[in-house]
Amino acid sequence: MSRPQNPFRFGDPVQGDYYMPLPEFDRLVSQFLENRIHTVLIGPRRFGKTSFVLRLLEEFEANGKVCLFVDIFNITSHRDFLQQILRALRAKKTWREKLRSWIETIPRLRPRLSMENDASSGLPSFSLSTDITEDKDVKETILDVFAAIERLGDRVVVAIDEFQKIAEIEDGGWLEATLRTQMQQLPNTTFLFTGSRKSVISDMLNNQSRPFYRSCQTLDFPSFGEEFIDWIIGRFALVGMECNREALLDLQRQVQNTPNYLQMACFHLVAMGVDRVGKEEIATALRMIVAQNSYAYQTLLNTLTATQQRSLRLAAKVCSQVFSKEVLERYEIASPAAMASAIKSLKDKEILDEGTARGVVIFDDPLFAIWLRMEFPD
Ligand SMILES: Nc1ncnc2c1ncn2[C@@H]1O[C@H](COP(=O)(O)OP(=O)(O)O)[C@@H](O)[C@H]1O
Ligand SMILES: [Mg+2]
């Protein structure tokens, strides 16, 4: 008898049975987009933003809209940005012929994109011509491509994943301003952005001197509640495993409610072949996952100053009231100012994140906090 597939998945965006539907949030976001309101979804990394957007776009496409999904997480330049848009266009396999005629309608665009036939499928494809190296040409091409996207359909939705990268490119704000202009000028196109760096995005949207000032509806990506635990129990049941609900709720707290890590721990619990999932089994799985990252965490820690390391250890243990005198003394941190400055650097390095209240810090990676607690017990 073949073993049933593991019902859990982590790492990449999930779909189909591996995805817990979010019908209410679906409806909310759809309402905005249907009414041509540009929308920003903000939420921590690994919370399910990309999975959500991909699923929503599928539904929109089924309803006759033209959707484009552009992932800019790794861009470092205008050229990278352009390449990612072209890549998103190429991913639309059924549009091949449409894209070819579309490129031909824009005279300036044609020489900049080279048409070729895809070796494996024989279908027409295109890529950025290798002569386009000057930033000026790249910029013009970005504008042309936007103008062309508009012609792809009557209703177009462009999703840009991890869009705060636009603000992090050092170009004097050109890309940010350009995108804003496009949002205003393309009457049939609605933008859906996602982002994980709350402080960067808040400044983009709330600073009067920046182009995105009040241009979008922002929504906090919802954190999954107990319904996710029910969903997980249902997934375990598929492979005949029972589990203790309280123990899963406790795991959910430990991983700061991060769906990715819940699925990761559950994946390992299934792989370990335990019969019944309880507190101890979960602790074992969690230790194993954390140990797998141990080398990376150790390396990261070694790049930090002594005060930063102590501040992190403190934050991993204490979480709130991190500035209290008693706590600072225990962790050998000279003053609240030294702690504040360490926290600021750790935020810049994207290791810590903005908490909701003063004196509360959040780890970008909750497993790192668990590792610190394991590595430095009091
Ligand atoms: N709706 C969901 N149902 C179940 N698991 C989810 C869901 N959304 C996210 N996950 C889990 O989180 C992981 C990361 O999802 P992803 O969409 O890439 O997050 P983000 O884009 O916010 O970083 C997935 O591999 C999966 O394990
Ligand atoms: Mg993502």
Image: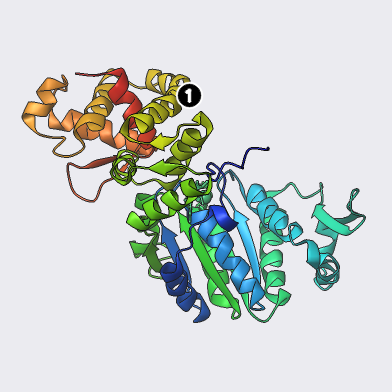
Work out whether residue 215 or residue 12 is closer to the camera in this orientation and state it: 12
> Which residue is at the front of the view, 233 or 128?
233
Residue 347 picture location, percent across and down: 34, 38
Q: Quadrant of residue 182?
A: bottom right
In this figure, which residue is indicated by the disc labeled 1? 292
- Considering every residue shown, the one lying at the far front of the view is 1
Quarter placement of the N terminus: top right
Q: Is residue 185 above or below residue 132?
A: below
Q: Amino acid at mark 1?
A: Gln
Q: Up-down: is 83 above or below 143?
A: above
Furthest residue toward left: 326
Identified at 71% across, 66% down, the residue is 144
When asked about the image quadrant of residue 124, the answer is bottom right
Please indicate, yes or no, whether residue 174 appears anywhere in the rendered image. no
Q: Name the image quarter holding residue 371.
A: top left
Q: How many marks?
A: 1
Disc 1 is placed on an element classified as helix
Q: Is residue 152 visible?
A: yes
> Is 96 on the left-hand or right-hand side of 358?
right
Q: Is 56 positioned to the left or the right of 367 in the image?
A: right
Q: Position of residue 161 (x, y in %)?
A: 54, 55
Q: Position of residue 186 (x, y in %)?
A: 60, 76
* Quadrant of the frame with the C terminus: top left
**Dot 1: within a 10 Å radius of its alpha carbon, few (fewer than 14), some, or many (20 or more) residues?**
few
Protein image colouring:
rainbow
Name the one closer to the observer, 131 or 189.
Answer: 189
* Mark 1 Cβ and ligand 1 under 8 Å apart: no
Please tell me which residue is depicted at 49% across the width and 74% down the height of the picture: 30
Residue 248 rendering spot, x and y as whole percentages: 34, 43
